Image (tube, rainbow, N blue to C red):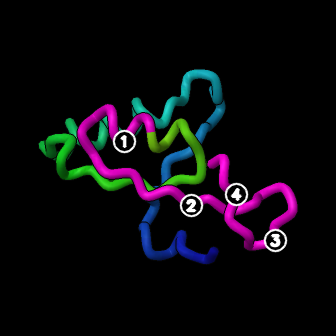
Amino acid sequence: LGLAPYFEGRIHAPGAEPRAFTKRAVMEDLLTRHGIDGAGLVSFGDGLVETEAATSLGGIAVAVCCDETHRSGVIDGPK
């Protein structure tokens, strides 16, 4: 999408130990580090993991429900 330059290195993704990475842990760390409660969290994601993590912490989840398999741009209803 070409959005990375706008986030100045603040995009979090699995590194050398992908099994140790959880999106919820990243969200919790960001909230703690910046002194923000869950109500100040807005998460954008394309799956259940992101939406569940954000809402369980008291935040808002914005789901991107596109068909990634075929890259058709059509909404994927089950997501």
Q: Nearer the viewer, residue 13 or 70?
A: 70
- Measuring from the top left, give residue 24's x and y in whole percent: 42, 33
The residue range painted magenta reads 52-79
Q: Which tag is nearer the camera, tag 4 or tag 2?
A: 4
Closer to the camera: disc 4 or disc 3? 4
Spatial CA distance of label 4 from label 2 is 9 Å
At label 3, counting other C-alpha atoms closer than 10 Å, the crowd grade (few under 14, some 14-19, many 20 or more) is few
Q: Which residue is mark 4?
A: 76
For the N terminus, the quadrant is: bottom right
The residue sitting at 66% across, 47% down in the picture is 78
Horizontal arrangement in the rendering, residue 9 relative to residue 35 (left or right):
right
Magenta span includes 7: no
Q: Nearer the viewer, mark 4 or mark 1?
A: 4
Query: In the current view of this chain or complex, which residue is farthest to the front?
Result: 77
Residue for point 54% across, 69% down: 4
Q: Gap in Å between the C-alphas at discs 4 and 1?
A: 20 Å
- The residue tagged 2 is 64
What is the three-letter code of the residue carrying label 2? Answer: Val
Tell me which numbered mark, 1 or 2, is placed earlier along the sequence.
1
Determine the secondary structure under disc 4.
Answer: loop
Q: Secondary structure at mark 3?
A: loop
Percent coordinates x, y for residue 43 in the rendering: 39, 53
Mark seen at residue 62? none
Q: CA distance from mark 1 to mark 2?
A: 14 Å
Q: Are marks 4 and 3 in contact (CB under 8 Å)?
A: no
Decide which of tag 4 and tag 2 comes sooner along the chain: 2
Say which residue label 1 marks: 54
